[in-house]
Image (spheres, grey):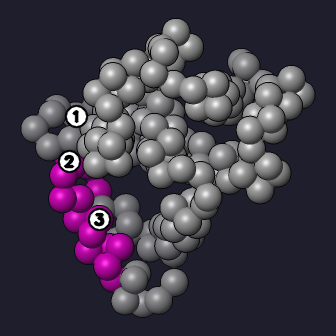
Amino acid sequence: MSKLLSKTIVKGAGFTNMKNRMNYFKIAPKAFESIMDLEQYSRKTSIDKKLRELIKLRVSQMNGCQFCIEMHKKEAKKLKASEEEIEQLSSWKDADCFSTKEKVVFELAEHVTYIAEKRLDDGLYEQVRKYYDEKEYVDLILIINQVNMWNRISISMGNTPKGKGKM
């Protein structure tokens, strides 16, 4: 990653809209440059942008990352996610506003996020593959893991939306 981009990341991590314990981007810039490289990759996948944001929101809901929930709600709205989609996301299985193709991704996200309890069997893999090719499957797994990593970093670093108390 370029030095300019690195400085931008550290400066941007002044955390415009959050409270946190420290500027961890500044403390471990090389590590966060690598994380940001993966973030950039995930943003360039062929996975629909709105769906990608809804995945991030759903995973953040499961992990209880309030900062990330707020951020991904705003981003989902910018990408034309309806209020119904955002409100129904936590109960996606029963929601009529999501297609079967979207629901299989939310199920995948739950299984990856709760991997120790839910595992990811061949049946779910085959369901996902009905709608997504091998490259898209890999990209979905990377997107889900990327947001899980961000959630865990955010929570462990004490990030909260401005105006909210510490977690």
**Left or right relative to 68: residue 141:** right
Whether residue 101 sits left or right of residue 8 in the image: it is right
Highlighted magenta segment, given as a residue range: 7-22
> For numbered disc 2, what is the local secondary structure?
strand
Q: Is residue 164 visible?
A: yes
Asked if one can make out residue 56 in the rendered structure from this viewpoint, the answer is no
Callout 1 crowding tier (Cα within 10 Å): few <14, some 14–19, many ≥20:
few
Q: Name the spot of residue 53 as percent of width and height, x first.
A: 44, 44
How far is disc 2 from disc 3 in space, using C-alphas? 11 Å
Where is residue 8 drawn, in percent x and y? Answer: 32, 79
Q: Secondary structure at mark 3?
A: loop
| Three-letter residue code for mark 2 | Lys
Q: Helix, strand, or loop for circle 1? A: loop
Q: Nearer the viewer, residue 23 or 36?
A: 36
Tag 1 residue: 166
Question: Which residue is located at x 29 percent, y 41 percent?
Answer: 77
Lower position in the chain sequence, tag 2 or tag 1: 2
For the view shown, which residue lies furthest in the right direction? 122
Q: According to the image, label 3 marks what residue? A: 13
Q: Is residue 110 magenta?
A: no
Q: Are marks 2 and 1 in contact (CB under 8 Å)?
A: yes
- Residue that badge 2 annotates: 19
Q: Residue at x 45, y 37 (%)?
A: 54
How crowded pointer 2 is (Cα within 10 Å; few <14, some 14-19, many 20+) is rated as: many
**C-alpha span from label 2 to label 1:** 8 Å
* Residue 156 placement (x, y as % from top left): 41, 41
* Residue 40 placement, left or right of 14: right
Q: Amino acid at mark 1?
A: Lys
Quarter location, residue 119 = top right
Percent x, y for residue 113?
62, 31
Residue visible at 22% across and 65% down in the picture:
14
